[in-house]
Image (spheres, grey):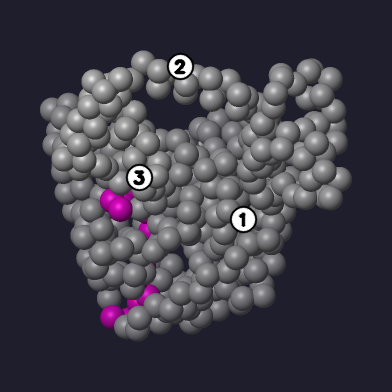
Amino acid sequence: MRILHTADWHLGRTLEGRSRLDEQAQFLDELCALAEEEAIDLVLLAGDVFDTVNPPAAAEQLFYESISRLADKGRRPVVIIAGNHDSPDRLAAATPLAREQGITLLGYPVREALRIPVPAAGEVLCLAALAYPSESRLNELLVESQQEELLRDAYDERVKHLFHQLSAAFSPSTVNVAMSHLFVAGGSSSDSERPIEVGGAYTVRPSSLPAHAQYVALGHLHRPQDVKQAPTLARYAGSPLAFSFSEAGYAKSVTVVDVRPGTAAILKEIHLTSGKPLVQWKATEGLAQVYRWIEEGRDARAWIDLEIHLLQALSLEEIHRLRKLHPGFIHIRPVFPELEERRERLATAELPIEELFKQFYRRQTGGAEPEEALVRLFLELLSEEGEGA
């Protein structure tokens, strides 16, 4: 069985007010083409289909058209779970129509695994699918205390138990896979995830993932990555586009999983080419350097975060001209080195001589801290020089 694992589409998301819908449409075209080229038997989408619980109509239309293409009139099953950004009810509302095309939509956590025949592979998938399991969506109060540590332990234990319930249906004759949308401790996050639960109370230990699954397909973190210290092969597919400049330089991809009953899964990462990259420019030589880069065609298709060193503020006309020459500028942040140096001089002028010596020592040694004996020796020498004067 050949499975395509993807997640975190965030359809409808903008970048500082700029629409990304065209880029998302390009990605979905690429995904549909990959499904054909790679002879994919089944698609798993691990949550955060949309960026908000009330997405734009154009984003919903793009979603339904794309999953219909992926399902290929029911010949390729597609399973989609809600993430923390999705409305569970809204996502599952189309279930009666979707089911006829081999598409499964899960808004809320369920207690039983799905058995999905996969005709192209001649196998059955047993899927422990756990849609985003918040307290409200589980309809449970996990702990009355407000202490984060207690809630984290209770949440981890609850998710572990849910996976145990779901994986009870695994059998030697089926392909056994788990899927969820959650934060596993140790994962590498970025600014674009935005949820308060990343690194907070809604955290699951790697050891709580189902050990008997042949593969665990995860969504929530936007950087593609394997889960370290998990009892089985577990992976975040990552988002298809970079959604914040903290993701500048990330390679975006989807994951293809080859697996048969009773055998170890084999992963293949396929890098994506659609969408504009997010890049950061640091123009230390001022405005002329920026114009030179634009003239050279540097990052012509990118969204750009520009930091520009200046002697005086940019006029509105200059800002408009920059944006006209390159429509990809998102932020234009002026830096005034002379002002920074002046602030540093004023700040250091108020520091004790002992602290100034320590700062000098750090600069000269690349960050090393001077020993107390050396600091005392410096102060003694300074004192002697003062007395001699």
Front one among 321 and 88: 321
Callout 1: SS? helix
Which image quarter: residue 178? bottom left
Q: Name the residue under label 2.
A: 346
Where in the figure is residue 116, as x and y percent of width and height? 43, 67
Q: Is residue 89 magenta?
A: no
Image mark for residue 367 = 3
Callout 3: SS? loop
Above or below 287: residue 316 = above
Q: Name the residue under label 1.
A: 67
Q: How far apart are marks 3 and 1 (CA)?
A: 54 Å
Above or below 68: residue 22 = above
Where in the figure is residue 127, as x and y percent of width and height? 37, 64
Image mark for residue 213 = none
Please state if 6 lies on the left or on the right of 57 as rendered.
Answer: left
Front one among 324 and 39: 324
Few, some or many C-alpha atoms within 10 Å of disc 3 (few <14, some 14-19, many ≥20)? few
User: N-terminal of the two: label 1 or label 2?
Assistant: 1
Q: What stretch is highlighted in magenta?
A: 172-186
Q: Does the magenta stretch include residue 173?
A: yes
Please state if 300 lies on the left or on the right of 336 as rendered.
Answer: right
Which image quarter: residue 346? top left
User: N-terminal of the two: label 2 or label 3?
Assistant: 2
User: N-terminal of the two: label 3 or label 1?
Assistant: 1
Callout 2: SS? helix
Kindly identify the amino acid type of the residue bearing the numbered disc 3.
Answer: Gly
Few, some or many C-alpha atoms within 10 Å of disc 2 (few <14, some 14-19, many ≥20)? few
Q: How far apart are marks 1 and 2 (CA)?
A: 61 Å
Q: How many labels does the image show?
A: 3
Kindly identify the amino acid type of the residue bearing the numbered disc 2.
Answer: Leu
